[in-house]
Image (spheres, rainbow, N blue to C red):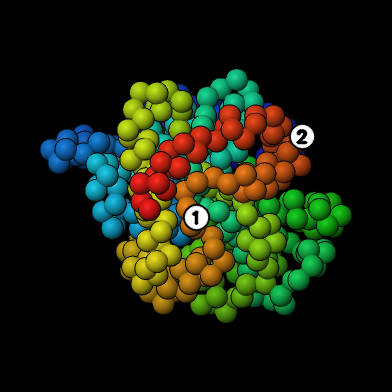
Amino acid sequence: MSERVSAISASASLSLDRRRFLTTSAALAAGLGAPSLLGTRKALAAGLKTVRFSEAVHNLGYINLYVGMHAGIFKKNGLDMQVSAAGGDTQTFAAVLGGSADFAIGDATMAQISRENGGPGVVVGTVVQRAHYFGVSKTLEPITDPKGFKGLKIVTSPEPNTNYSVAKRLLEKAGMKVGVDATIVPVNPGTEIAAMLAGQADIAIAYQPSVAAAEAQGAKVVFDFSNYIGPFCNTGIMVLPTTIQKDPEMVQALVTSFEEASRKTYADPAFSKEVARKEFPDLPGEVVDKAIDAELKYLIPAQSVITKTDQWANLMEMQVYLGNAKGSVPFDQIIDNSFAEKAIASLK
């Protein structure tokens, strides 16, 4: 999730650029996103463990996180969540590498790339279980076949963000060449809808609540990536093995909180909408409600924090296909489901 990263045009250099970014930005990230001293003192006074938590971007795909915070689930489990938005997938994992965050949620491919290059990284849970992107347009009719993207200008976030990756994979799997048969127009994350509405593209690949906001302005969803791709570890909880070794109780408390929050998101949609309205106060309430309805309808937030093999396989298939990762680290070496399994057992 990429305010400080330039778009990368050549896919052959993408993996190298991502790896360089992860290593060179870690030092910078070490000085960013640290919780305030006041917040830390308050947490200590309340007997809570301060958790420095980085989210790639603030969006409704992460509703489980926000539900857990507003419902007091993290605090109940002894955690004071200090959450900051990093601005992109690469930056959020760089915050973990650099030591300014204990955990990060974003494209879990970042941990895979780190491991493939001799670095650290473990995925201890899933937060978004489907590709939470929709094709939105004011001019197009619904697209039922990926070949229907031929000749279109498609606006997404820049590489290496996931909505760029899913768009590129869709085009190439349909036998099209990016830049020849269809054009991808990269813009800053979160501005995809505005670019489409301004006429820079025929269709925007975007996520909630931006999609619902666009619908309120006359646009409509014309393609659904969640069903096109199927089970998909769109967003994982990433952590360093040293953190697990040093404080397994904190890791367990966090994963247990996400499991409980995941269940509450689906069990109490009215509360999820209430939380979403608080997290996105600048949007009309009815727009936010519609966004949550879509999130739950398409099963986008994780229903359980455990990372399933088919979710991970679909993510790796896409990233290997695009050349972003080698897929050389086995599932049971990059995924640690032990905390999720304990969480599920404790909440039965």
| Residue under the point 42% across and 70% down | 288
> Which tag, 1 or 2, sits closer to the chain's start?
2
Q: Name the one closer to the observer, 21 or 319.
A: 319
Q: From where the camera sits, is residue 306 visible?
A: yes
| Residue under the point 79% across and 67% down | 145
Please rate how many residues cluster around mark 1, counting C-alpha atoms within 10 Å: few if below 14, some from 14 to 19, many from 20.
Answer: many
Q: What SS does tag 2 mark?
A: helix
Residue 14, located in which quarter of the rendered image?
Answer: top right
Residue 191, located in which quarter of the rendered image?
Answer: bottom right
Q: Amino acid at mark 2?
A: Ala
Q: Position of residue 194 (x, y in %)?
A: 56, 64
Total marks drawn?
2
Please rate how many residues cluster around mark 2, counting C-alpha atoms within 10 Å: few if below 14, some from 14 to 19, many from 20.
Answer: few
Q: Name the one closer to the observer, 304 or 346.
A: 346
Task: Residue at the far top: name it.
Answer: 118
Q: Amino acid at mark 1?
A: Ala
Q: Name the one closer to the observer, 158 or 130.
A: 130
Q: Position of residue 234 (x, y in %)?
A: 57, 49
Q: Which numbered tag is attached to residue 12?
A: 2
Q: What SS does tag 1 mark?
A: loop
| Residue under the point 69% across and 34% down | 327
Q: Which numbered tag is attached to residue 202?
A: none
94 w.r.t. 215: above or below = above
Question: Which residue is denoted by mark 1 in the rendering?
Answer: 302
Say whether residue 63 is left or right of residue 18: left
Q: Position of residue 102 (x, y in %)?
A: 38, 33
27 w.r.t. 11: above or below = above
81 w.r.t. 196: above or below = above
| Residue under the point 73% across and 51% down | 168
